[in-house]
Amino acid sequence: MDLTLPEKVALVTGGGFWGTRAIERAGIRSVALTDGPHGLRKQAEGGDHLGLGDSVAATCFPPAAGIASSFNVELVERVGRALGDEARAEDVAVLLGPGVNIKRSPLCGRNFEYFSEDPLVAGELGAAWVRGIQSRGVGASLKHFAANNQETNRMTVSAEVDERTLREIYLPAFERIVTREKPWTVMCSYNRVNGVYASESRWLLTELLRDEWGFDGLVVSDWGAVDDRVAALAAGMDLEMPGPQASSERAILDAVTSGSIDESVLDRSVARVRALVDRAQPQTEGYDADAHHQLAREAAVESIVLLRNEGGVLPVEPEQTIAVIGEFARSPRFQGAGSSQVVATRVDSALEALLPRASVEFAPGYSLAKGDDASLRKDATALAARSDVALVFVGLPDGDESEGFDRRHLELPPAHVELIRAVAAVNPRTVVVLTNGGVVSLEPWHDEVAGILEGWLLGQAGGSAIADVVLGHANPSGRLAETIPVRLQDSPSYLNFPGDNDVVRYGEGVFVGYRYFESAEVPVRYPFGFGLSYTTFDYSDLEVAADSVRVTVTNTGVRPGAEVVQVYVEPLESPVRSPVRELRAFRKVWLGPGQAITVTIPLDRRAFSHWDVTTGGWQSGGAYEVAVGVSASSMVLRGSIVLPSTKTRGRLGLESSVADWLEHPVTGPIFRREAAKSGGLEEGGASVLDMVASMPMRRLLNFPGVPVTEKQLRLLAALANNPVARGVARLFSRD
Ligand code: BGC
């Protein structure tokens, strides 16, 4: 049925906080879009958008910061399927996630909702998430597109990012997911990108997303991200949320009636909203909450990263007595605050999970409200002194990190640091269990404790998962998806975060996270990719090809365990300044004691490429090392490979530099021979030709005494630009 103009306008504006507009006359129903990402937050219409109000109970899986450490694509896909089932059970058409923004700074208040500082990890895990959700007939909303890497001024700030950095760091996760998984929707971010609101950027929403990547779904605004509705519509921003928005609707009506925007532009977005509504089939099948809780526990186990284990303090032996210290053991913080906050179906605390399984005593050690920390610390220290092992649960309280603001430092609360040090002073078998959405500093107490478990935020079953790992019923297999720096000041965006006067300059370029630390050789506390296990692994027989890496991994210990095989590529002669190495593939493998497995991991050409601004495309070629590492800073095996260049040589002309003339297969040999003959071109060992290498040839011509005329050069250029001559020259240069 044809829609009237006002009906069309209504359809591209929300019908409430969480739904599209119903047009009953035309039989178009309203469908629900709700948060996300790590659990369903379905609120009653009119509920408060900030997530403080009630929403239906749902499984709270580990937020992205946690589950990213699993490096387990298959696990994330299973979580995605469970999320899809829960959404379906509540008749939700689209779950608002995953968030695949890059952790540019450890301070970003929303880092707990994002996967990694590395685009491959964010892209692979985000893709699995989308695959899982959408396999259940529920749409994903890939967010926040794009360059939304901070909360400070997130509604207006302009992220000033050069194109190479966008292409290599901030866009690839989106690109991978859009091209491979076809998400039903993409959510544009609040911020501006290079001066233009993401919601109004035709380059982002149409040229890149649709024309280049082939996106055929719907673009939805982040909630309240539309500044100029007509400009947004023209750019390709289909659905404004939330709604209704009388002023936006009026603006579109006026623009179409006055002819300042063609009605076909509106029709395009209307068609996309209708396609979304048609795609979403009403469903209300139930789901198995117990099975989902078990899955949340499995996911939490794989999210935990064992950072330190001196003297094999973990796992705790069955006969050892355990002092469980820290309020977080009893009252866990398992997710971040803001729009992603889920009302969990149930919550396991580590204390409850440990009590029936070990000899445990508890002391809170600090108070989450303002309390007498000194006397709590005293009791806790006394308990630690009389126990075999002390587990100290510390981390960031709820108010310290949230959507909407960035952190200002990486420190734990002082009471937590004091507690760690006091306990470690009386018990050499002290293990710190961390709860934090974003990276925290492990200084100055790191060397004083025997063990550290980085627990991130683990979702509702995190307490049981910690007990599983502490007692050795599960072997930790998490690896850091982000670097833990020694100091905040060491992080690459330190001086450029969060910007001034509503502008943030991504001055560190492609050198984000480990790409910087490894290239500049800045020491870190723990590198990206790092994580210990209760067993050990050995690597052998690396074979490197242009399209794959083959390697054998052996479990050389006595326990079953999982290893994350990390493949890094190091360009040896990049024409542009590039990170010393970049993660280009990974695979998690499970091995019994003594077991070996040979894995073949595909590599695509992109793994060897950089974004070339001169051609506006991906270029590769030259010599590379391909290394298998146990973290970004520790390579265990290496191979090398040389690939032909993909870059076609530009045409040679008088504007080309002297270097271009010298490197050209046709003109290079001629020039060098003539230079050698004239003899006068050597000066103090350096060739004059090399000294003027960057000068355009036209300018060199005007130099007195240059023994070549413009006419000769034009003839030579014509010869050089002739493909036959180039082929012949190449043939002879090979002999
Ligand atoms: C957040 C989104 C979220 C939306 C709906 C916004 O404030 O940035 O991530 O999906 O609200 O709650």
Image (cartoon, rainbow, N blue to C red):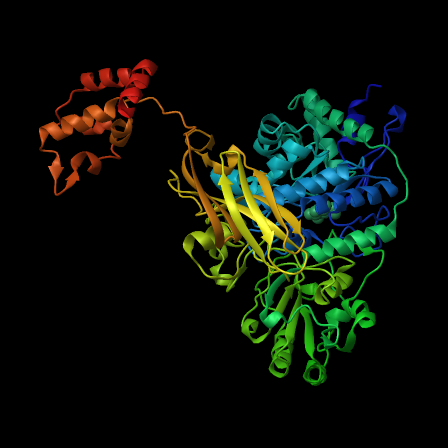
Residue 43 in picture, x, y percent from top left = 84, 49
Which quarter of the picture shows residue 301? Answer: bottom right
Image quarter hosting the C terminus: top left
Which quarter of the picture shows residue 147? Answer: top right
Image quarter hosting the N terminus: top right
Left or right of residue 94: residue 497: left
Q: What residue do we see at 54% from left, 73% from top?
A: 447
Is residue 155 in sight in this rendering?
no
Residue toward you, 546 or 598: 598
Q: What residue do we see at 58% from left, 49% from top?
A: 553
Residue 696 in picture, x, y percent from top left = 26, 30
Left or right of residue 476: residue 81: right
Tell me how many marks there are.
0
Left or right of residue 549: residue 35: right
- In the image, residue 632 sits, relative to residue 351, either above or below, namely above
Residue toward you, 605 or 238: 605
Which quarter of the picture shows residue 145? Answer: top right
- As drawn, which residue projects farthest toward the front? 594
Residue 275 in picture, x, y percent from top left = 77, 27
- In the image, residue 727 sits, relative to residue 690, either above or below, namely above
Q: What residue do we see at 70% from left, 59% from top?
A: 457
Q: What residue do we see at 67% from left, 70% from top?
A: 394
Is residue 308 in sight in this rendering?
yes
Residue 222 in picture, x, y percent from top left = 69, 42
